[in-house]
Image (cartoon, rainbow, N blue to C red):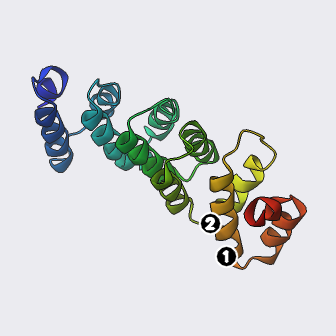
Amino acid sequence: LKDLIANGKTDMAKVHALWTLDGLHQLDEATVASALGAKAPRVRSTAIRLCENFLKTDARSRLLAKLIAMNYERKPFVQQQLALTLGEAADHEADLAMAKLVQQTPDTGFLIDAVVSGLGGREASLLESLVTDSSSNDKLIAALARCVVASRKAADIEKLQDGGVDAIMFG
């Protein structure tokens, strides 16, 4: 199966081989890391998703660095999976990489949704990092601000008001 992933003739064969190895608990770091660099978007997307299991192992830092470095990705469904997987990492650098993905493709609404869905309690921290960056996406900032308000954490909401985010949200 590993040879099929590296040398297979069809993208779907490679995708199936990745999932089969994962199901057999035989997928290793080297194989999934190699698949992250595949030419085929479906193979890359699958490899990104399969990295999630490794985020709970000693391979975390190595694979997370590779995932963060993929913020150049241009294929929308690969971007979406990358954002969802980076969200699972629960890491500030990964959160910043998700924001960079959105900055590079500002009109991709589903990507903002993927970023917000993966933050789970880290919205205020990311918002604080982005609000001073003039290249930040206003739609992402507004979505993060809505999450902070919905959290009903008074201290975080006060930071929003002090940071001028209300002007972005309410024009």
| Kind of residue indicated by mark 1 | Ser
Badge 2 vs badge 1, beta-carbon distance below 8 Å: yes
Q: Is residue 9 above or below residue 169?
A: above
**Residue 96 in the image, given as x and y percentages of width and height:** 63, 43
- Name the residue at 46% across, 35% down: 67
- The one nearer the camera, 61 or 164, is 164
Secondary element at tag 1: helix
Which residue corresponds to mark 2?
Answer: 121
How many C-alpha atoms fall within 10 Å of the one at disc 1: few (<14), some, or many (≥20)?
some
Ranked by sequence position, the earlier of labels 2 and 1 is 2
Real-space Cα separation, disc 2 to disc 1, in angstroms: 8 Å
In this view, which residue lies farthest toward the right? 162
Mark 2 nearby-residue class (10 Å; few <14, some 14–19, many ≥20): some
User: Residue visible at 77% across and 41% down?
Assistant: 133
Q: Nearer the viewer, residue 44 or 141?
A: 141
**In this view, the mark in front (2 or 1):** 1
Give the number of the disc on residue 73.
none
Q: Left or right: where does residue 145 sit relative to residue 75?
A: right
The correct choice, above or below, for 63 with respect to 92 in the image is above
Residue 63 vs residue 164, the one in the foreground = 164
The quadrant holding residue 41 is top left
- Which residue is farthest front? 171
Q: In the image, is residue 15 above or below residue 72?
A: below
Looking at the picture, how far across and down is residue 117, in whole percent?
Answer: 50, 62
Q: Residue furthest bottom?
A: 152
Which image quarter holds the N terminus?
top left
Give the image quarter of residue 3: top left
Q: Total label count? A: 2
Q: Amino acid at mark 2?
A: Gly
Residue wearing tag 1: 151
